[in-house]
Image (spheres, rainbow, N blue to C red):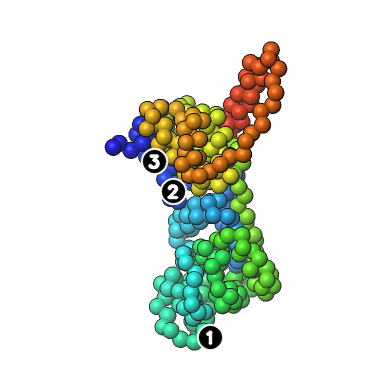
Amino acid sequence: MSAYYRFFGLERDPFLDTADPHFYCELGPLRKAKERLGGSVDQSRGLVVILGEPGTGKTSLCSALELDLLQDESVVLGKILDPTFASEIEFLIAVGRVFGLALPPRSSAALKNALKNFFFETAVLEKRTLVLIIDEAQNLTEESLEALRMLLNYHVPQKKLVNILLFGQSELEARIAERRNLADRVDGWVRLPPLDVPMASAILDFRLMRAGMTPGHTVFTLEARTLLFEGSSGSPRRLTMLAHAAMEEAADRGATLVNEDHVRTALRARGIALAERAEAPVVAENGAAGSARRIGFFSRLFSRSAAR
């Protein structure tokens, strides 16, 4: 069976659930977040915490930032995907490993001293910028959080020796706040908000264009876009998942335009129920005009978002 997206004349799947930089849509909040992170790294200010619920774009933001950092030869980048370590020693060994160090199991003090020496040689003698990214940081143990606090103590008068970027869910904020000595070292908090209507529409159009959609063409009706946004609850991940399912449903029915019914089928298949929307009473003689005004409103709204 041919891939569903080819039915719409597309070259690639526009709504694959991966953090593919090709489909990274740098909307206003994400652009500001990446600029904030880049500025902190450039100035070697230490610790930045990035917070967001599952599906709000943390992984996409992290991947886009990594791509920028890897293009800078002066940056030494290390990343820990799963920070659930049984002990502080395991955590410190893992930090060394992501920077290419083969640290033998030793005491916590010895490992910290080895890392401090490496940080100093790299950041001061070689004049390079060290960046440690930790994903799923809400899973850090108390011991690991304390180890991070100690690593942030390593600095020279002009800068921190290592920059630490923690990507985590909202509960991470409370855990850090409980540790005042660590919270005081946070250079910045970056919170990823849920999507609004223009942002959701911009993501749909951007992904479709990156997948090969002909300029001026459309795939989703205005009503379908509205339902996709409502069903997503502002989550980019859920938005792309529902858009994928609705396009598959339309392709199965031989429809080249995804409408409200296709989206409702996708919502039902995933057990997503929407609140009933109350219809405002319309005077009979003004019905056509009222409908035209509503269509015009959504057309302007989505046209503005696509142009951003």
Report whether 295 appears left or right of 216.
right
Residue wearing tag 2: 17
Mark 1 neighbour class, 10 Å CA radius: few under 14, some 14 to 19, many 20 or more:
few
- Residues at circles 3 and 1 in contact by the CB criterion of under 8 Å: no
Q: Position of residue 275 (x, y in %)?
A: 62, 39
Residue 237 vertical placement versus 218 (above, below): below
Residue wearing tag 3: 13
Residue wearing tag 1: 109
Residue 155 visible in the picture = no
Q: Position of residue 143 (x, y in %)?
A: 56, 77
SS at mark 1?
helix
Mark 3 neighbour class, 10 Å CA radius: few under 14, some 14 to 19, many 20 or more:
some
Name the one closer to the observer, 278 or 308: 278
Q: Amino acid at mark 2?
A: Asp
SS at mark 3?
loop
SS at mark 2?
loop
Residue 78 visible in the picture = yes
Label 1 vs 2, first from the N-terminus: 2
Residue 106 vertical placement versus 34 (above, below): below
Residues at marks 2 and 3, CA–CA distance in whole angstroms: 10 Å
Q: Position of residue 214 (x, y in %)?
A: 42, 29
Residues at marks 1 and 2, CA–CA distance in whole angstroms: 42 Å
Residue pictured at 47% horizontal, 26% vertical: 216
Name the one closer to the observer, 91 or 254: 254
Residue pictured at 47% horizontal, 39% vertical: 266
Report whether 303 appears left or right of 180.
left
Q: Residue furthest top?
A: 285
Which quadrant of the rendered structure holds the C terminus?
A: top right
